[in-house]
Amino acid sequence: MATKYALIGAAGYIAPRHLKAMKETGGSLAVAFDINDSVGVMDSHFPEAAFFTEFERFEAHVDALNRAGQGPDYVGVCSPNYLHKAHMGFALRSGADAICEKPLVLDVSDLDDLAALEMATGQRINSILQLRLHPAIINLRDRIAAGPKDKVYDVDLGYFTSRGAWYHASWKGFEQKSGGIATNIGVHFFDMLSFVFGSIRENIVHHRGIDSAAGYLEFAQARVRWVLSINRDHLPTHTPTGQSTHRSITVEGEEIEFSGGFTDLHTASYQNVLDGNGYGLDVVRPSIEVVSRIRNASLEPSRGERHPDIFKVLK
């Protein structure tokens, strides 16, 4: 029997990847919700799925499905970051597991609340951490694991992705809703770094603004200088002409190429969950601790090494 899904946030940027993953893993979408009704993409995957723009009607429909013994097995959560906790709570209380986009939550205390709800309901939360399934990242992790256990690698992470004025007017531009740049954009990189280099040892914040952030992290086997920005004016001078995004991760000066291979990672993530290997709350906790500290810590611009591209960000 096909796995049954509900989807929250069907009109969002990332929703098509979830719809594709549901379809390609043999599932069926029973019902979807979004406050916006630009959801024509559903026709390409599940044209018969019910759709609601009022959460109360969506909730009533899920309740009716449950009473008929046809409720969803999983609820995909693609809503704005600050709503993730509430929507995962709805999923668990409805008798379904959750598959949620990153960042799973904004604060560490939210993880404790969700862990208690998992215990109370017997349901499970799974986070999309697709970089852990990227072949280049897996290869890097295996290389580090096969190397000297006491070696600490020098790593530079720079991610510049231009965003227009719309970004600051949307929920993403409000820290209390998105968590800020480091949370909204950086969390999956920080998770990837812990996946490859082990537990976090130190977290120093050099810069924190509405359009950029930078700092220094130490992991068990890495010293990481990092900088993130959504400001086009911050693009490094060595960015190719006409390119609006610059992404670079170097390990001991060697560029790690992982820009390709993203197309099917959500499908792989869903299959991972179906196979019983989803990434739960304990796996997510280290990266949420990192971004929570970045959001709240005092700035220490003179401590730790600074990423070489930070100087353009600070101008």
Image (cartoon, helix red, strand yellow):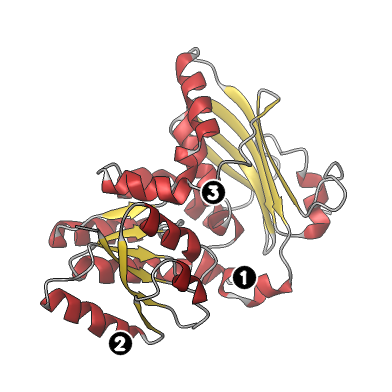
Q: Secondary structure at mark 3?
A: loop
Residue ID at (54%, 48%): 263
Compute the Cα span from label 1 to label 2.
29 Å
From the top left corner, tell me how far across and down residue 190 is, in percent. 52, 43
| Residue type at tag 1 | Gly
Which callout, 1 or 2, points at the residue further toward the start of the chain? 2
From the top left corner, tell me how far across and down residue 74 is, in percent. 27, 62
Q: Secondary structure at mark 1?
A: helix
Residue 243's label in the rendered image is: none
- Vertical side of 30 occupied by 270: above or below: above
Q: Where is mark 3, residue-wise?
A: 263
Q: Where is mark 2, residue-wise?
A: 57
The C terminus: image quadrant: bottom right
| Residue type at tag 2 | Arg
* Front residue of this view, candidates 170 and 245: 245
- Vertical side of 114 occupied by 63: above or below: below
Mark 2 is surrounded, within 10 Å at the Cα level, by few (under 14), some (14 to 19) or many (20 or more) other residues, namely few
User: Which of label 3 and label 2 is nearer to you?
Assistant: 3
Which callout, 3 or 2, points at the residue further toward the start of the chain? 2
Q: Where is mark 1, residue-wise?
A: 173
